[in-house]
């Protein structure tokens, strides 16, 4: 029996890409205002700086990775002394623009009351700053209270503890096959892959369900619950 549904944040509930781009554009505009040397710095440069730093420090807190990427970008124009102010500018703009996908609030409303809803993320998108205040029974953030990032088993153990039910009653929903499907399943949770982009699925990964929109999630949860009851019934009959 499924009783708790726990969601990843970025690119699952939250449309992060426009927000990050908007934050970087604001930083780039301020860089160019501060010095002519920034005229040769492009948005693509700032994006590549994130890729380079993230690739080398993916286990670190996302906030620190972003600051390190911005430091790398500012060094391109000799603006290293402005890191604090431009990081603050980036995060203010990023959170201002971060909002749920259109299918999120209706889906959460359809689920509420029947399932316990949770929010558990590697990122720094706090629910209350991204238009999702009060939507969840619990929220978990990597690197708070020593919680490691997904796919560490401790992350999923914390999800199960917060849900207050056995792992088999928890469904994790997210866009990352590694973090939101394989990791949860190894920890005994069920996993639904939200594949908004229609990407091909590797044959060796088998989510419990695959969706392209959260609008289909309520029906899918009911179906999974029915499948569980049928399977339990078959086991009982076989005895």
Image (spheres, rainbow, N blue to C red):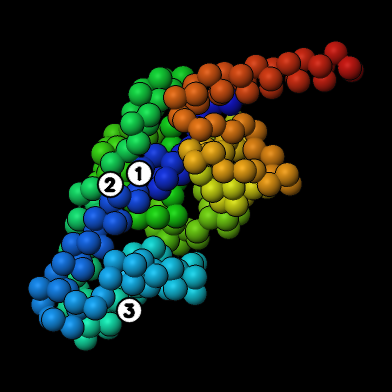
Which quadrant of the view contains residue 154? bottom right
For residue 140, side relative to residue 186 (left or right):
left
Marked residue nearer the N-terminal end (3 or 1): 1
Binning the other alpha carbons within 10 Å of mark 3 as few (below 14), some (14 to 19) or many (20 upward) gives many
Marks 2 and 1: CB-CB under 8 Å? yes
Q: Residue at x 73, y 44 (%)?
A: 203
Cα separation between marks 3 and 2: 24 Å
Q: Position of residue 217 (x, y in %)?
A: 50, 26
Q: Position of residue 228 (x, y in %)?
A: 69, 22
Which residue was labeled with disc 1? 15
Marked residue nearer the N-terminal end (3 or 2): 3
Q: Residue furthest left?
A: 33
Q: Position of residue 171 (x, y in %)?
A: 56, 34
Q: Nearer the viewer, residue 42 or 63?
A: 42
For residue 128, side relative to residue 170 (left or right):
left
Q: Residue at x 39, y 34 (%)?
A: 137
Which residue was labeled with disc 3? 72
Q: Residue furthest right?
A: 239
Q: On the rendered image, what quadrant is the C terminus found in?
A: top right
Q: Is residue 160 visible?
A: no
């Amino acid at each position: 029996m499924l009783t708790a549904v726990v969601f990843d944040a970025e690119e699952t509930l939250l449309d992060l890409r426009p927000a990050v781009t908007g934050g970087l554009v604001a930083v780039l505009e301020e860089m160019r205002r501060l010095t002519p040397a920034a005229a040769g710095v492009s948005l693509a440069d700032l994006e590549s700086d994130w890729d380079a730093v993230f690739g080398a420090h993916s286990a670190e807190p996302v906030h620190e990775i972003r600051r390190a990427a911005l430091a790398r970008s500012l060094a391109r124009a000799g603006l290293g002394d402005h890191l604090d102010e431009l990081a603050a500018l980036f995060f203010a703009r990023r959170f201002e623009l971060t909002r749920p996908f259109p299918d999120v609030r209706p889906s959460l409303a359809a689920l509420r009351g029947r399932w316990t809803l949770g929010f558990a993320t590697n990122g720094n998108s706090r629910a209350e700053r991204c238009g999702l205040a009060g939507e969840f029974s619990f929220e978990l953030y990597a690197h708070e209270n020593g919680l490691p990032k997904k796919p560490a088993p401790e992350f999923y153990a914390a999800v199960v503890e917060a849900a207050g039910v056995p792992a088999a009653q928890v469904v994790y929903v997210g866009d990352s096959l590694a973090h939101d499907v394989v990791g949860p399943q190894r920890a005994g949770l069920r996993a639904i892959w939200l594949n908004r982009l229609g990407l091909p699925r590797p044959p060796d990964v088998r989510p419990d369900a695959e969706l392209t929109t959260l609008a289909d999630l309520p029906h899918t949860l009911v179906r999974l619950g029915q499948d569980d009851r049928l399977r339990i019934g078959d086991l009982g009959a076989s005895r």
